[in-house]
Image (tube, grey):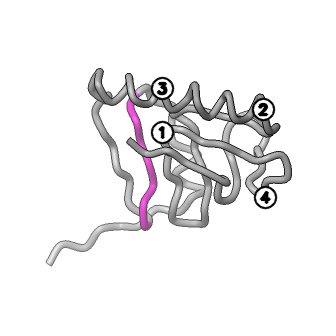
Amino acid sequence: METRMKMTAAAFLELPETNLPRELIDGEIIEMTAPELDHQDVVLNLGILFKQAAKERGGKAYVAPVDVVFDEINIPQPDVIYLAPESRCIPEGTKRLLGAPDLIGEV
């Protein structure tokens, strides 16, 4: 049986920046290749809809890659994120979000 070392959010956030998608899920680093063009087309369309909602209702819209810190072992990068005006998901400086977004779009 293989034993894998779990990583904490603090250690994950200290890793060097990369251009490829990388998430921390259940304490394990998940690295992916760049998304396919069809995927990116859908993400762009969702991003436009989320941005329009933010303009009409207030709030903010983001597209990946944005780290979202849920807890000490989970930091996903949802494809598209919407934060309502009174969202409990808050920016930590200019690098990441803390807490669950109000709406995500995952392609």
Residue drawn at x 36%, y 67% as measured from the top left: 5
Which of the two labelled residues, at mark 2 and mark 3, occupies the earlier sequence position? 3
SS under mark 2: helix
Q: Is residue 15 magenta?
A: no
Residue type (three-letter) at the residue carrying disc 2:
Glu
Question: In the image as oriented, which residue stretches furthest toward the bottom?
Answer: 1
Labels 3 & 1 near each other (Cβ < 8 A): no
Q: Quadrant of residue 57?
A: top right
Task: Between residue 43 and residue 92, name the one nearer to us.
Answer: 43
Where is residue 81 shown, x and y percent of the image?
A: 60, 42
Which of the two labelled residues, at mark 4 and mark 2, occupies the earlier sequence position? 2
Residue type (three-letter) at the residue carrying disc 1:
Asp
Task: Between residue 2 and residue 24, name the one nearer to us.
Answer: 24
Of marks 3 and 1, the one in the foreground: 3
Of marks 4 and 3, the one in the foreground: 3
Name the residue that disc number 1 marks: 79
Instruction: Write down the region rendered in magenta.
Output: 20-26
Name the residue that disc number 2 marks: 56
Which of the two labelled residues, at mark 4 and mark 3, occupies the earlier sequence position? 3
Residue type (three-letter) at the residue carrying disc 4:
Arg
Labels 2 & 3 near each other (Cβ < 8 A): no
